[in-house]
Image (spheres, rainbow, N blue to C red):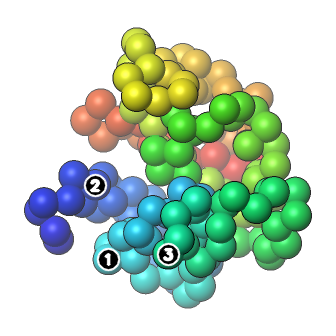
Amino acid sequence: MNSKNPWSERFNFVVTHIPIDCTVVDFGCGNQEILNFYKPKEYLGIDKIPNAMMNLNLDIDDIKIKNYDVGLLLGVLEYVDNPDIVLNKIKNFANMFLILTLPVKKKLEWKRAFTEDSISKLLTAHFNSVENFRYNRYILSKVSV
């Protein structure tokens, strides 16, 4: 574990909720550091940064990807203009999603701030099943279509 990476502890927590030997699509993958903590059967990292496997700057309506076992949105919804649109567009890309958010009262440097109630309400509007797990101040939501 890389102790200098502030995401290390969060990744260790998240991977305990990913089934063994599954396929993973990672929206907002960054440098794909989750791969240091979990080795999926197949992985697709999508982000705006150059080293992503697929560039998120593409119109998501034009992305043709198969259905993965697990979709990850780890610290992503806080940065999107319209979470409802994003969730509607990606929910058919995976059977289950793990969505990590940090409930706060103000936006900080983000476009969006969520409270525990608002993230639950948002996810319940888009998914059939929502189960929340706490890690320190974070909420990891395990949702299925």
Q: What residue would you read off at disc 3?
A: 51
Amino acid type at circle 3 is Asn
| Circle 2 Cα neighbour tier, 10 Å, few/some/many (<14 / 14–19 / ≥20) | some
- Of labels 1 and 3, the one closer to you: 3
Q: In the depicted view, which residue is nearer to us: 110 or 132?
A: 110
Check residue 7 in the rendering and tell me which mark sits there, or answer none: 2
What residue do we see at 11% from left, 62% from top?
Answer: 3
Instruction: State which quarter of the image contains the N terminus.
Output: bottom left
What percent of the width, then of the height, locates residue 101? Answer: 45, 37
Q: Contact, CB < 8 Å: mark 1 with mark 2?
A: no
Q: Mark 2 or mark 3: which comes first in sequence?
A: 2
The foreground one among 105 and 126 is: 105
* Image coordinates for residue 89, horizontal then vertical, percent: 81, 49
Identify which residue is drawn at 59% across, 85% down. 42
Residue 45 position within the rendered picture, expressed as x and y whole percent measured from the top left: 57, 71
Going by the image, does 82 lie left or right of 31?
Answer: right
- Above or below, 116 against 130 in this view is above
Residue 7 at x, y percent in the picture: 28, 55
Q: Is residue 16 visible?
A: yes
Horizontally, residue 32 falls left or right of residue 56, namely left
Give the residue displayed 43% in from the left and 82% down from the top: 39
Query: In the displayed structure, would residue 40 be above or below residue 101?
Result: below
Secondary structure at numbered mark 1: helix
55 to 105, vertically: above or below: below
Question: Disc number at residue 36?
Answer: 1
Give the amino acid type for the residue marked by disc 1 in the picture: Asn
Sequence-first tag of 1 and 2: 2
Q: Earlier in the sequence, mark 1 or mark 3?
A: 1
Residues packed near mark 3 inside 10 Å, few (<14), some (14 to 19) or many (20 plus): some
Mark 1 and mark 3: span between their CA atoms?
A: 16 Å
Q: Residue furthest bottom?
A: 41
Assess disc 1: are there few (<14), some (14-19) or many (≥20) residues with their C-alpha within 10 Å of its C-alpha.
Answer: few
